[in-house]
Image (tube, rainbow, N blue to C red):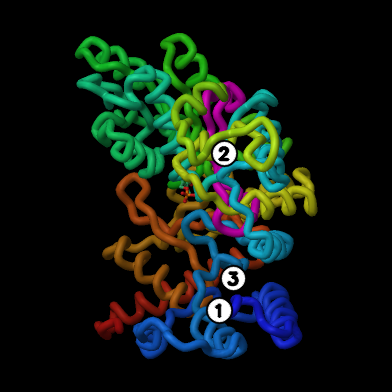
Amino acid sequence: MAPSLDPEGWSDLRALGHRVLEDMFDYLADIRDRPVWQRMPDSLRQELRSPMPRAPESPAATYDAVCRLIVPYATGNVHPRFMGWVHGGGNPIGMLAELIAGGLNANLGGRDHAPIEIERQVVSWAAEMVGMPPATSGLLVTGTSIANMIAVLVARRAAAGPGVRGNGLCGQQLTAYAARTAHGCIARAMDMAGLGSDALRLIDCNEDHRIDLAHLERTVQQDRAAGAEPFLVVGSAGTVDVGAVDDLAGLAAFCQTESLWFHVDGAFGALAMLSPRYRTLFSGIEDADSLAFDFHKWAQVPYDAGCILVRDGAKHADTFAMTSTYLRREERGLAGGHPWPCDLGPDLSRGFRALKVWMTLRAYGADQLGQVVEQSCAVARHLAARVSAEPALELLAPVALNIVCFRVRSDTEPDKLNRDVVADLQEAGIAAPSTNTVNGKLAIRAAIVNHRTSPADVDAMVDAILQMAAVRRAATFSQIPTP
Ligand SMILES: *Cc1c(COP(=O)(O)O)cnc(C)c1O
């Protein structure tokens, strides 16, 4: 008989487990002492091209490889000076939850067990957070990309009727609407749902970077006149480029009048509903037919943890539920407890990502997460003020929440200079903003999401930017080729 994968005696593995835990606590406690990011050297990458291991090695040797090959070369988003894209910082309670979830190895596709009740509670907390009704249906998913895709599919089924699941669209021209600033995953969701990304009409924005409602209304009328069937409007609660919040109440009213599905992409912004100061900006979010957001961004839950909420649970289940004999539901026993999560999305087997969300929310409380949101926005305002006070820098967009787009002024090749400075900063391990284009100009974009980021961190980043830009300018003037 082949041996089980458990050890014969547990003491060595137990000791290794304690060491791993100590090391990961040290990793978090000492994060400031390390570079934000360092590129994994080619020599180490080469080691990862070895063939599949046939023979066992000791768990300690495997862990040594983790420490040597992986830990020093991670993305860096745990670090307080990581400000690129929109990345959450994670948290130590969530880290412990991952350990427990791994041990329990629960499958949340269905059946009657406590982990599913935990996911149901997380979904109801999410609905409470944004002011949707207690009966709101929902699911934890990998991220907002897939949550947006689920929303498109539910809206498609609601608009096209039950036949669409068997027959497809049969020539129906369903069209959706979102601002030009909407995240690219919405167009991809349209593509993946079989509607085509061109069926997403991109609506202009006003100077606040919010959707232009008049242009939306005109476009919907024109499409109807041309024989298309408008079915879905997607509002952004926190755009990925500058953090703008669409007029959600205006969109909700428009969708109500026009009988259109109102979906909100609140990937990071929805968490601002936990802040008394910012929640008013999001008025109307509670009227969404569906809402997608991430716990792994502003809620600091370790990756990955996205969430889809659907107001009408019957419409949600109508989109995905299937009957098959091997998944038969029973009134009693382990096959009870329906409806099952596998009726609410494309996955059958699903991990226990709800636990890290549940433990994070319990351990810190929603109010403290709201304070983290406010602190991020305060740090962003500090950064914007600092940028405005530096003659060498210019602010490129208004700061509604936590995203600051700015750049170093330059008479010659400003886009190149700013792109180089960002790469210099990242490679020096000092800070990690990303880049973006705002009104045709390349911007340095700092998204303050990590709960560890302080005003001193953004000041250190600005100091380094000014210094690195000066070095680059000097190099250009003396015609020294840059490396
Ligand atoms: C991050 C983001 C997404 C994509 O979410 P993932 O969790 O990365 O899949 C979608 N929309 C907005 C506004 C985002 O910020």
Q: Pick the residue in front: 203 or 410.
A: 203
Dot 3: within a 10 Å radius of its alpha carbon, few (fewer than 14), some, or many (20 or more) residues?
few
Q: Position of residue 114 (x, y in %)?
A: 72, 46
Q: Is residue 429 left or right of residue 365?
A: left
User: Please, which residue is most extreme toward the front here?
Assistant: 1
Please state, as top left, top right, bottom left or bottom right, where the N terminus lies in the image: bottom right
Circle 2 residue: 341
Q: Name the amino acid, label 1.
A: Met
Q: Amino acid at mark 2?
A: Pro
The type of residue carrying mark 3 is Ala
- Residue 9 lies left or right of residue 191; in this view the side is right
Q: Are marks 1 and 3 in contact (CB under 8 Å)?
A: no
Magenta span includes 251: no
Image quadrant assignment for residue 383 = bottom right
Residue at 36 percent of width and 86 percent of height: 50
> Can I make out residue 68 in this image?
yes
